[in-house]
Amino acid sequence: MTISGGGFVVRDNNDTIIFKVKGKLMTLRYQRVLLDAAGKPIVTLREKIMSAHDRWNVYRGESKKSSDLILTVRQSSRIQLKAKLHVFLANDTIEEVCDFMVEGSTWTKKTFVVYTGDRTNIVAKMCKKTTVRSVLIGKDHYSLTVHGNVDYAFIAALIVNILDDVTHN
């Protein structure tokens, strides 16, 4: 994964583009759209303003309708020394126990693990790669491992949310 010019690109080990992200500031809130390699919108991430915790809603395609809500991502608390995000699927309206959790080292190290909500299974890991190219060109590169039977677009949407937080904090 690389971040360039405010956008994200996800590539596989053969350097083939899997996902792209286009983003924009929309009247006090950010919005990002995860696209497949052909440019078709998969999900839209919209920052929710005026919430107790930093919160992002993720919708199918480019929708903004509540009926197309897939999941909500929010920080576990306002002040964090380490990254900790709670992920709630759309059908979880009570939000007492998260369906997935993202934990990371300090924002500067940029190493993150995605767990099931009960923390019994790791579903993905991401860490920043430091290469000569990334230092010279200034593009951040990340290594992402997604475990079996996990939707890549789901993980990509979470990672885009994390990297958005990292680049804006």
Image (cartoon, rainbow, N blue to C red):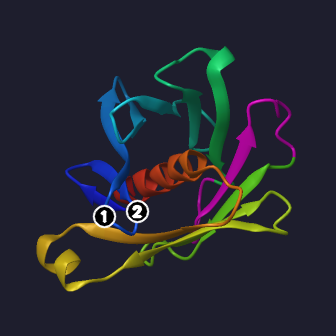
Cα distance in 3D space between marks 1 and 2: 5 Å
Q: Amino acid at mark 2?
A: Asp
**Residue at position x 60%, y 46% in the image:** 154
Proximity of marks 1 and 2: CB atoms separated by less than 8 Å:
yes
Asked whether residue 48 is drawn in magenta, I would say no
Residue 137 is left or right of residue 159, and the answer is left
The 10 Å Cα crowd at callout 1, few under 14, some 14 to 19, many 20 or more, is few
Residue 37 is left or right of residue 147, and the answer is left
Helix, strand or loop at mark 2: loop
Vertical order, 152 against 40 (above or below): below
Q: Main secondary structure of the magenta part?
A: loop
The residue that disc 1 covers is: 15
Q: Which span is picked out in magenta?
A: 78-96
Quarter of the image that includes the C terminus:
bottom left
Q: Quadrant of residue 121?
A: bottom right
Residue 12: which numbered mark, if any? 2
The one of 95 and 70 positioned closer to us in this rendering: 70
The one of 144 and 14 positioned closer to us in this rendering: 14
The one of 28 and 19 positioned closer to us in this rendering: 19
Quarter of the image that includes the N terminus:
bottom left
Q: Position of residue 161 (x, y in %)?
A: 49, 49
Asked whether residue 81 is drawn in magenta, I would say yes
Helix, strand or loop at mark 1: loop
Residue 154 is left or right of residue 156, and the answer is right
Vertical order, 36 against 133 (above or below): above
**Residue at position x 17%, y 70% in the image:** 138
Q: Amino acid at mark 1?
A: Asp
The one of 52 and 114 positioned closer to us in this rendering: 114
Q: Position of residue 31 (x, y in %)?
A: 41, 32
Q: Position of residue 115 (x, y in %)?
A: 73, 64
